[in-house]
Amino acid sequence: MTDLSALPLVFSDEVSRARTEGAALVALESTIITHGMPYPQNLETARAVEQAVRDNGAVPATMAVLDGQIHIGLNDDTLEQLAQARNVAKLSRADLAACLATGGTGATTVAATMICARLAGIGVFATGGVGGVHPGLAEHYDISADLQELAQTPVTVVCAGAKAILDLPKTFEVLETLGVPVITVGQDTLPAFWSRNSGLPAPLRMDDPAQIARAQVLRGALGLPGGQLVTQPIPETAEIAAEVLAPVIAQAQSDARTHNISAKGLTPYLLQRIYELTDGASLTANIALVLNNARLAARIAREMPASAT
Ligand code: PSU
């Protein structure tokens, strides 16, 4: 067990109350706010996602590191400050402790949010899309730390697949190698973030939130480390067809190469470029899929016993 007293953890009033009452909790990340969407849509989305969790019977816990403290749940003022802040660090497993030690401020990626969720005893987390294997692996070895985190931290992550800017076949191969259950909800093929269908078969399909929660609990009981990746397709009315998006993604990737963008800067750059190239349509889709994932995560969280983590 982690010694929580040694950690600078700050719980929001809403999350503290939920913990006392044993209410269902859903973790939310902050990198999507600081690096994934422009202001003010990032703030509006963060608020709407929290509300979607509440409307579906759970309590939201948005994670961030502020002045060297891990915040589990943010109040509205803090959410607003974060949404407008510039040059906030993007924290993953490798830099979380260093940020705490130096009193820094940073937004949590999927990997860092999973770590914070586990500390807070939260077993379910909703986001848009996990990181993965970027294309051109031979020249630029870029694999998101999110994948390794799924293999070791027992949190069920609800997303709309990996972002379509990634090499999806390689991303799901890596997850298979790492022994991460990849579960699709409602269809037999993996979704592709802005589009419903990646053309890749879903390794597992489960449509019942109670079964998804139970599978996470049984993983723990079996002595298997790690979480599960739940992939839910974007709502039909909000999707952008893969054929429409493919040339846009190719253009954004070519622009990233021209400007020598890599490492932590790559995903935010590509998302921003695709937003520009689609006249904002990619953002509208991104918002719709995150909200949809928040609703499902709340339904899974309600089925998860507090001791699941
Ligand atoms: N989901 C979104 N938008 C985002 C992200 C998720 O809809 O920006 C963030 C998550 O924080 C995820 C990160 O961990 O993108 C992946 O970044 P990278 O490829 O650098 O690992």
Image: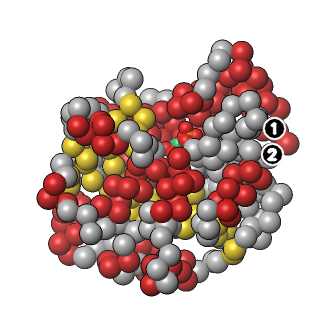
Q: Is 307 placed above or below 156 here?
A: below
Secondary element at image label 2: helix
Q: Residue tagged by mark 1?
A: 246
Task: Give residue 171's position: percent from left, percent from top.
Answer: 69, 52
66 sits left or right of 271 in the view:
left
Q: Nearer the viewer, residue 127 or 53?
A: 127
Question: How many tags in the picture?
Answer: 2
| Viewer can see residue 233 | no
Task: Give residue 70's position: percent from left, percent from top.
Answer: 25, 47
Task: Give residue 151's position: percent from left, percent from top.
Answer: 53, 62
- Residue ranking furthest to the top: 259
| Viewer can see residue 138 | yes
Residue at 53% over, 32% down: 264
Secondary element at image label 1: helix
Task: Give residue 139's position: percent from left, percent from top.
Answer: 74, 30
Quadrant in which residue 143 is drawn: top right
277 sits left or right of 226 in the view:
right
Ligand 1 picture quarter: top right
Residue at 21% over, 43% down: 69
Q: Nearer the viewer, residue 267 or 57?
A: 267
Q: Which mark is residue 49?
A: none
- Looking at the rendered structure, the kind of residue marked 2 is Ala
Q: Residues within 10 Å of mark 2 (few under 14, many from 20)?
A: some
Quadrant in which residue 56 is drawn: bottom left
Q: Is 287 placed above or below 53 here?
A: above
Q: Residue tagged by mark 2?
A: 242
Q: Nearer the viewer, residue 201 or 225?
A: 225
Q: Nearer the viewer, residue 33 or 91?
A: 91
* Discs 2, 1 touching: Cβ within 8 Å: yes
